[in-house]
Amino acid sequence: MNFPAGSNLLCDGKPRVRRDWDLIGDHERELYLDAIETAIERGIHQRFAAYHADTKSDVQAHETCGFFLWHRRFLFAYENMLRSLGP
């Protein structure tokens, strides 16, 4: 699936709300952990980790004024990936 950058198409156009782990129910926790497990099993999580640790990415992500912007975009992409795996 290809979604435009910054799109909420995976959220039915609704704004995303991230809640503290302690404030979400058991069902939502299970969905999240299942998505992480699936991402690890398929090697997708490892690709994100490798991209984050890549020498060029590391400089952009950690040694510039773009630290927060880079990580915001990175987490947005990671969240999109988890959501694309479905319930």
Image (cartoon, rainbow, N blue to C red):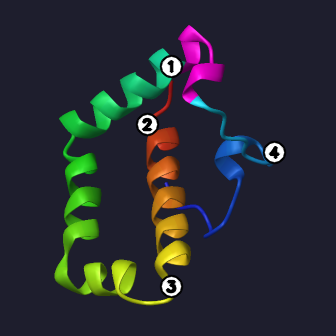
Kind of residue at disc 4 = Lys
- Label 3 to label 4, Cα distance in Å? 27 Å
Determine the image quadrant of residue 22: top right
Q: Position of residue 13 (x, y in %)?
A: 80, 49
Q: What residue span does the magenta drawing correspond to?
A: 21-28
Q: Are marks 4 and 1 in contact (CB under 8 Å)?
A: no
What is the three-letter code of the residue carrying label 2?
A: Leu
Q: Nearer the viewer, residue 83 or 50?
A: 50
The disc, 3 or 4, on the residue closer to the chain's N-terminal end is 4
Residue at the far right: name it: 14
What residue is drawn where x is 23% and y is 38%?
40
Residue density around tag 1, few if under 14, some if 14–19, many if 20 or more, within 10 Å: some
Position of 35 compared to 15: left or right? left
Task: Assess whether residue 62 is covered by the magenta stretch.
Answer: no
**Coordinates of residue 27 in the picture (x, y in percent):** 56, 11
Q: Tag 1, which secondary structure?
A: helix
In the rendered image, residue 22 lying in the magenta stretch gets the answer: yes
Q: Earlier in the sequence, mark 4 or mark 1?
A: 4
Which label's residue is closer to the chain start, 1 or 2?
1
Q: Which residue is mark 3?
A: 66
Say above or below: 5 vs 33.
Answer: below
Q: Which mark is residue 14?
A: 4
Residue drawn at the location 69% of the way across and 51% of the way down: 9
Residue 5, image x, y percentages: 61, 70
**Residue at point 55% right, 66% down?**
72
- In the rendered image, which residue does mark 2 sit on? 85
Of the image marks 2 and 3, the number of the one nearer the N terminus: 3
Distance, label 2 to label 4, CA atoms, is: 19 Å
- The tag on residue 29 is 1
Q: Main secondary structure of the magenta part?
A: helix
